[in-house]
Every structure is written in structure tokens, then in C-alpha cells.
Amino acid sequence: MANLIDGKQVSAAVKEQVRLETEKLVQESGKRPGLAVVIVGNNPASRVYVNNKKKACETVGFQSFEYALPEDTTQEELLELVQTLNSDSNVNGILVQLPVPPQIDDKAIINAISAEKDVDAFHPENVGRIMIGDYAFLPCTPAGVMELIDSTGVEISGKKCVVIGRSNIVGKPMAMLLLHRSGTVTICHSRTQDLASVTREADILVAAVGKANFVTADMVKDGAVVIDVGMNRLENGKLCGDVDFAQVEPKASWITPVPGGVGPMTIAMLMKNTLTAFKKQNQLA
Ligand code: GUN
């Protein structure tokens, strides 16, 4: 029987820390952290994420600025908004919810966001900083995973860590954060041969594949820490992770549920990054 890693509880603790620090800084400086969230079009999943981000801003005492743009927004219009937000001193963090509609090049948008306000840590400058271990912002989802692993008390240093998935948003930075903590890290992906033989070696297994119930019991070592980044919507509307929870849970020492595992952490880490941005921009750090 595995211990459950409670993402709701860990994320609430992170947000409470952010709230307390924000309250203190607002009193000292008379300024309040602000996050601008931009959503283009009507993607229902994006709508839910954006609403949750706004709610989290309220919880921790930030101002939030929402910009909901129509589906047919041009790249030039979005770039113009990003420039306006870059020069607005009430806006400390800028997040353009992805995916954007096909007429917009997401790379051009990410590149246009000021690196100091890039609370997603998607800008090439921030990605490069993560690579060399000299960063202000951690990418939200991998940073949330690190908090969850730390909440178990399991030491990362020296352990075999396997990440399934090589996306720019999760897999690659995840591997880098585990490496910075002296894990022995392997990244697996769709071309990996005999995937199960690699994942079975993992003391810490992070699944970021995007396929429901992809990780089965035969792929998991006894006593592994299993982190499920997946958020797959099944045909019946239910949310399901990348890990077959019923099968894997008896083998793992610790495991995250879906929902209630990694999901809430991403938003908590976004709040932490926005506070960091606010402090840096106002020389409060
Ligand atoms: N779409 C899905 N996850 C994310 C995220 O973390 N940030 C942004 N900007 N868009 C997303």
C-alpha cells in the first residue's frame, strides 16, 4: 500500500506561505503583486485553468488582470498586448495561456514576454538559466513535482530518477531539476526501446506522457515514488492520469492521485513565481 501524496495539502501550504509574505510586503512597500493572464479563444480546458489561476490570485492577495481575446485575434494584436503589459509596472507576471489558436506563433509570443515577467519560465533566457542552475523562476509544473517529492521526505540525491516524456514544459525541465538535486536521471520518450526495463529501475518515476493509464504495474519498481503529471480527459468526462493508479498503487511507496496531485501544485508555484517577480522588480528581495 502506497502513501498518498496530497497535492491539495502541499499546494495550500505553499499558497499560505505566499499569502503571508505578500501581506507583509504590501504593508512595507504599499505595492501589491499583479499577474496578467491572457486567454485567446474558447478552449474549455484553458478557461478552467485561467479561472483557477484567478482564484489563486485572490487567495494569496494578488491583483489579477484577465485579458480574454477572441479566437480570431492576430499575432500582431497579441504582441501589442504583451508589449503593453511588459511596460505596465502594476503587472509583475505575464502568462499567455497555451495553446493559442493556429494563426499565432506561440514561440513569437513567448519570446516577446519580458524575461523578468515570464512567470511560466518559458522564455529562452529563463530556459537557459534553468540549464545552468542560475534561475529566478522555476517552470511551474516541474517545480511543483519537486515540492511533492520533498514532502515525502525521500532523498533525491544519488537516486535513479526516470522521467517519461520530453516536452519543453515538463519533461526536459523536470529532468534538469532532478539533476540539480543530484539524481541520476534518465529521460524516456516514444522512441525509447524496452521502456519498461528502464522505468523498472526508477526509485523516483515521473510520468508526463499525456496517455491515460500508460504506466502499468510491470513498469514500476517495488517501493518507487510515483509522480503522475498526466491530466487526460476520458470519454466519460472523468479526469485520468498517465499512471494506472489501481495497478501501480500497491507497488509504490508514495504516489500522487489524479486529480489532487500535481495539478494544484502548478498553480501554487505560479503564485510563488509571481511573488518572486514582484520582489525582484521592486528591489524587495
Ligand atoms: N497550458 C497548459 N499548461 C500551461 C502552463 O503551465 N502555462 C501556460 N501559459 N499555458 C499552459
Image (tube, rainbow, N blue to C red):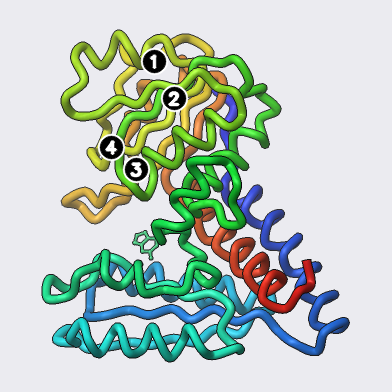
- Quadrant of res 193: top left
Residue 239 image label: none
Task: Decide which of tag 2 and tag 1 comes sooner along the chain.
Answer: 2
Q: Disc 1 residue type? A: Val
Percent across and percent down for residue 39 are 33, 79
Task: Provide the secondary structure element on which disc 1 rests.
Answer: loop
- Near mark 3 (Cα within 10 A), the count class, few <14, some 14-19 or many ≥20, is many
Q: Is residue 210 above or below residue 218?
A: below
Residue under label 2: 205
Residue under label 4: 209
Q: Is residue 272 left or right of residue 71?
A: right
Q: Is residue 224 in view?
A: no
Residue at x 26% of width, y 70% of height? 108
Q: Quadrant of the C terminus?
A: bottom right
Q: Quadrant of ligand 1?
A: bottom left
Residue under label 3: 230
Percent across and percent down for residue 150 are 66, 34
Query: In the depicted view, which residue is nearer to us: 208 or 111?
Result: 111
Task: Provide the secondary structure element on which disc 2 rests.
Answer: strand
Q: Is residue 199 above or below residue 89?
A: above
Residue under label 1: 220
